[in-house]
Image: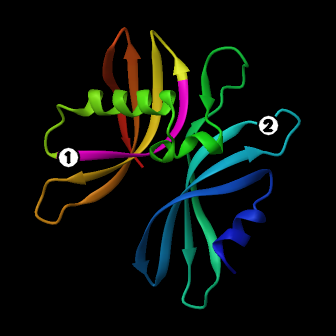
Amino acid sequence: MHIESLLVFSGGSDFELMPFLGIQIVSGQNCAFICRRKSVTLHPISTYSLVICYKDLGGNCEITRIKDVVKDSECSLGGIVCTKDSEAFITRLDSIEANHILQTFNKALCNVIGVKYSPILYIAYSISRGINYHIIARSTISDKVQTIGYQHIVINYFMETASIVSIEEL
């Protein structure tokens, strides 16, 4: 069974595969993805999730972990708003808003030493003394092996100032 078909049969949500993050070789393979999920309900809620699938040596797949990274607020006023799938791949967009978000990302992280962050997905925003941008980023640590990781980074932009709110390992 392929991973795409496995996600189709996960009840209660529609899954959309976003970027593939990597493979870990075990007695089979663990595969990591970011997915955009939308609940199959009267008032659907969108969620960006880290999905880990295990594929055994016989080719059988199963979801072993789903970790919600960010989720729409249930209240329509305020709170977190997930981006549409067409807005998520921020580095592929050429718009004033996308360029502003990328500039804010670079401005907030310009003084970080020892690790380089590259934005992959713009997943959500919230209004909070300015605007908070939620971004999935790839990190490369400045060590001998150039260790790679993925983080959920929240950046606040307020009155021409960009600052890091949080960095969470995925």
State the mark number for residue 44.
2
Label 2, secondary structure: give it: loop
Q: In the drawing, does residue 147 fall left or right of residue 96?
A: left
Tell which of 53 and 125 is nearer to you.
125
User: Nearer the N terminus, badge 1 or badge 2?
Assistant: 2
Q: In the drawing, does residue 79 fall left or right of residue 107?
A: right
Report the residue marked by disc 1.
115
Residue 29: % across, % down: 48, 78
Which residue sits at x=46%, y=28%?
A: 133
**Magenta stretch contains residue 121:** yes
Which residue sits at x=73%, y=71%?
A: 5
Which residue sits at x=61%, y=87%?
A: 59
Which portion, as a residue range, is magenta?
A: 115-125
Residue type at mark 1 is Val
Residue 169: % across, % down: 37, 46
Residue 162: % across, % down: 32, 20
User: 10 Å neighbourhood of mark 2: few (<14), some, or many (≥20)?
Assistant: few
Residue 25 to residue 110: above or below: below
State the mark number for residue 164.
none
Q: In the drawing, does residue 120 fall left or right of residue 61?
A: left
